[in-house]
Image (spheres, rainbow, N blue to C red):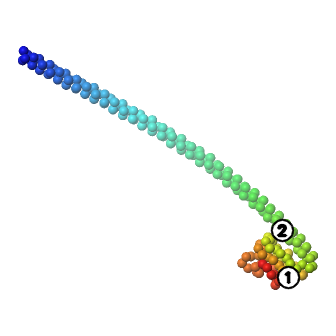
Amino acid sequence: MTADLNSVLHAYLSHTRSLLQKMTADMNSVLHAYLSHTRSLLQKMTADMNSVLHAYLSHTRSLLQKMTADMNCVLHAYLSHTRSLLQKMTADMNSVLHAYLSHTRSLLQKMTADLNSVLHGLRHLQRLNFAYCNLKGHLETLIGGLKQRLAYLNLRDCRSVSHTSHTSHTPHTPHTPYISSL
């Protein structure tokens, strides 16, 4: 009986081993097919995603190029308009400034002539103080024709006198030797 039992046990183990080998081969075959199919699906999905991504990037690039071109057109128009406005404003400001300077020059000449006539009427005038004034070269007109001699003429910080050479810009009048303060 032990021999029969060994023989049955041996047949059973041999059959079980055979079944396990067949099951392992079948599972390997199924697993191989599954992995192959999964690999194929992943490759197809990757190709599809690359295609979609390429189309998206191409479309985005096209949109960005169009937006850049549109922005360049708008910017060019804005800059052209701004340049035109600045040129017009500059011309208008130059015109206003020219009119203002012309009017100021005319007023200064009239005021200088008026002050000269007042100074000519002062027969006993001995002192003149033109410190910190802005005569702009009209000093000769103001005191050049005075008949009386001045004892004192102050031209300190007078904007018609150069800071480097006071006497070269001082009017040549009979009063020049009597200037005591510059």
Which callout, 1 or 2, points to the residue nearer the camera? 1
Front position in the image: 29 or 14: 14
Residue 16: give x, y in percent of width and height: 17, 21
Q: Which picture quadrant has residue 100?
A: bottom right
Q: Which residue is mark 2?
A: 108
Is label 1 in a helix, a strand or a loop? loop
Q: Which picture quadrant has residue 180?
A: bottom right
Query: So how many labels did they put on this image?
Result: 2
Front position in the image: 77 or 157: 157
Sequence-earlier tag: 1 or 2: 2
Residue at 56% of width from left, 43% of height from top?
67
Query: Mark 1 near mark 2, Cβ–Cβ under 8 Å?
Result: no
Q: Which residue is mark 1?
A: 151
Report whether 126 appears left or right of 33. right
Residue 32: give x, y in percent of width and height: 28, 29
**Residue situated furthest top in the rendering:** 1
Is label 2 in a helix, a strand or a loop? helix
Query: From what the image shows, is residue 61 above or below residue 149?
Result: above
Report whether 28 appears left or right of 95. left
Report whether 134 appears left or right of 76. right
Q: Amino acid at mark 1?
A: Ala
Q: Amino acid at mark 2?
A: Leu
Residue at 7% of width from left, 17% of height from top?
2
Residue at 92% of width from left, 79% of height from top?
124
**Residue situated furthest bottom in the rendering:** 177
Query: From what the image shows, is residue 173 above or below residue 96?
Result: below
Report whether 65 appears left or right of 36. right
Residue at 36% of width from left, 33% of height from top?
42
Question: Which quarter of the image is occupied by the C terminus?
Answer: bottom right
Residue 166: give x, y in percent of width and height: 76, 79
Question: Which quarter of the image is occupied by the N terminus?
Answer: top left
Residue 160: give x, y in percent of width and height: 78, 74
